[in-house]
Image: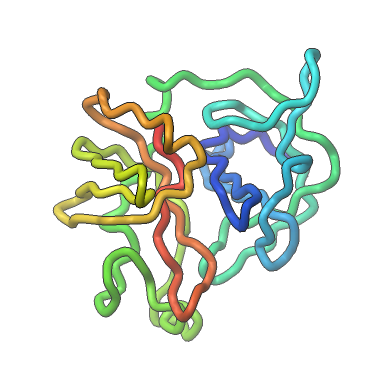
Amino acid sequence: MNKTLVIFANSVKHHQHCIAGKDILTKEWIRPVGDKNGCELKDEQTKYQNKYGKYLVKPLQKMNIKFLKKAPLKQQPENYIISNKIWEQNYKIEREDIKSFLDNPNNLWLDGVSKNDRVNYQLIQNGKIKISQSLYLIKVNDLQVNKEDRRATFSFNDTNYNLAITDPKIQYFDNSKKSYYLVISLGEEFKGYCYKLVASIL
């Protein structure tokens, strides 16, 4: 199963990597994972090959990736298990091209009972909340970043959010832009909740 993805996030998960991208043809989200449980990827698994050598994948690059099979979880339906074949770079997109990949959800998984930085895992498990996608690419105009606490505040569709940041490049955040593109990811279960994470700031 070969797919070409535009990579939108290479974030931190258990000191390793959580990669997320969109299929260049269908624009559907795919999260490359290491096993059926959604295992994070190691450095070597997130490197690509080009004529100059091997490098860690970066957002906005297009990657040809071979997958073994789809392995959806209730809280992360986009998971695909990668093969051991090295990824191949296939050019990249520019920042101005991001807007053609945007999602338009009504909200970021508000469950009606939890704080808006998390979703009650039990509600997902028992089917009262169905997660049709656990990744959103959105545009915001009022982003505030606290580098020390690694948190982001912003509003989206009249709701204010304060979320943890897992983008490893947060220390280089440039606050001079009028707007930002964010990849918001629903994380794995932790103490009864799936937390909402800012996986990438573009």
Q: Which quadrant holds residue 116? A: bottom left
Is 174 displayed left or right of 11 in the figure?
A: left
Q: Tell me residue 157's x, y (percent).
A: 19, 51
Query: Outermost residue, front direction?
Result: 148
**Picture layout, residue 89 above or below residue 22:** above
**Colour scheme of the rendered structure:** rainbow
Q: Residue at x 53, y 27 (%)?
A: 60
**Picture layout, residue 73 above or below residue 179:** below
Q: Residue at x 32, y 58 (%)?
A: 108
Camera-side residue: 160 or 170? 170
Q: Residue at x 45, y 41 (%)?
A: 200
Camera-side residue: 165 or 109? 165
Camera-side residue: 146 or 82? 146
Is 143 displayed left or right of 164 in the figure?
A: left
**Picture layout, residue 21 above or below residue 125:** above
Q: Tell me residue 126's x, y (percent).
A: 47, 85
Q: Residue at x 27, y 71 (%)?
A: 115
Query: Outermost residue, right direction?
Result: 84
